[in-house]
Amino acid sequence: MTTTTATRVLVLNSGSSSVKYQLLDMRDDSRLAVGLVERIGEETSRLVHTPLNREGAEQRERTGPIADHEAALKAVADELAADGLGLDSPELAAIGHRVVHGGLRFTAPTVVDEEVLAEIERLVPVAPLHNPANITGIRTARALRPDLPQIAVFDTAFHTTMPESAARYAIDTEVADAHRIRRYGFHGTSHAYVSRETARLLGKAPEDVNVIVLHLGNGASASAVRGGVCVDTSMGLTPLEGLVMGTRSGDIDPAVAFHLQRVAGMSADDVDVLLNKKSGLIGLCGDNDMREIRRRIDEGDERAQLAFDIYIHRLKKYIGAYYAVLGRVDAIAFTAGVGENAAPVRQAAVAGLEELGLALDSELNEVRSGEPRIVSTPYARVAVAVVPTDEELEIARQTIALAAPNSLD
C-alpha cells in the first residue's frame, strides 16, 4: 500500500470583492492552476480559471452572479475539481492566506484558530480596507476544509524586525501606543522573496548581503535589508506613506490634511480619498500607467514629464536614505510591474549616483526578460538587479514550511 505525501498548497488572496488564487506543488514550486474571481456580490461576477497541470488545457471563464465569498470559493473548488485538483485531494497540505496587517504580534506565518482570527479582527482599524476581506476568506476556507491547516502569511511580518528608531513616529508615546500608531510596512512577502533572490543572483547567502529593494507597481515601497533582515521600509501605519505611487501621494506634510479641512472644507473622508485614490501619478498627470506616461513624454507632454520627474526624485531620495541606513550596499533590486518592465525608470533612478558605486549597462537595462538578471556594468561596486517578484510562491513556501515541514524531505 502506498501513501500520498501532501505537497500542494492553495494560496488565497481575498479582497473586498475578489479572490485571487493559485495552486502550487511545492516539490518543484510548480503552478497547477491559477485564477481570479472578481465583482463578487454583483450580477456581473466573473471567474477566470487557468489549469496548468496538463498539456493543452485551456483557460475557462464563467460569468453571472456570485453572491459572496463562500459562493466564490465553492466555484473555485468546482473548477479545481474539474481538473482533478479538488480541495478534497489528499495531496493538498494546507491553504495559505495573504493577510495584509499582522500588527506587532504576528512576526511569522501563523496557523489560524479563533484566537488568531480575533486578533486579525482587532487590527481592522489600521487596515479597514483589507483585513475584513482577508478574514472572510479565511472563515470561508475553514468552513470548506475544517480539517486542513489554514496558514496566515502577513504582509507586515517581514518588517517587524525594524528597530524602534525606524518604526516609531515622533509623536506622544502614550497616544501612539494606545492607538497602535507606528510604522508597520507592507509588501513584506515581496521584499522577503526579492531580497533572498537577489542574494542568490549574486551567488551569496542572504545573511551576507545588504540590499535595497524597490517594489514599484501601482503601489510602491522600498526597503533596506541588512543580512536578510529588514531594518527600514517606506510604507508606514498604512500603505500611504513613502514613494509616489499610482494613485497614492506617498510622503506629504501632515498639515496638508488640516489645511484642506479648514480652507477647502473637505471632510476627513474626502482627504482620505484624495490622498489614496486621486493623488500620486494620476493626480499629477491623469494617468497611473507608466507606459502611457512614457508615451506622453515622448510626445512632449509637460505634465507627464513633471509627474515622472517627481516620481524619480522621490525614488532617488529613498535610495540615498537607505544607502545611509545600511552603510554598505551590495545590490539594488527593482521589482513589480514598473520595476521589472520600465527600463527608463531604472535608468533615471540610478543616473547621477555613480559616486555611490551605481552604473547601469544601457543595453542590459533595455532587455526584457522574466528572469532575474543583473543590469549594471561589470565594474560597478553596487549591483543593480531586476528580480521578478513572486508573492504567491513566497506565501506557499512559508505555508508548507509551517504546515508540513517534512513533506519535501
Image: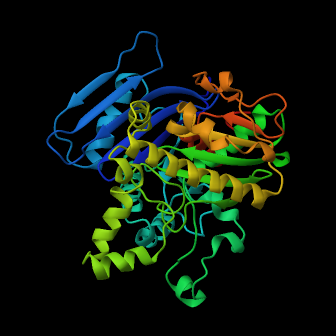
Residue 248 x, y percent position in the rendering: 42, 57
Is residue 45 among the parts visible in the rendering? yes
Q: Nearer the viewer, residue 70 or 314?
A: 314
Identity of the residue drawn at 44% across and 78% down: 255
Is residue 230 among the parts visible in the rendering? no
Name the quadrant containing residue 348.
top right
Residue 401 x, y percent position in the rendering: 66, 44
Q: Quadrant of the C terminus?
A: top right
Asked if residue 383 lies left or right of residue 185, the reply is right
State the count of labels: 0
Identity of the residue drawn at 81% across and 42% down: 357
Identity of the residue drawn at 54% across and 64% down: 102
In the image, farthest residue toward the top: 56
Q: Is residue 301 above or below residue 233?
A: above
Residue 363 x, y percent position in the rendering: 66, 21
Name the quadrant containing residue 373.
top right
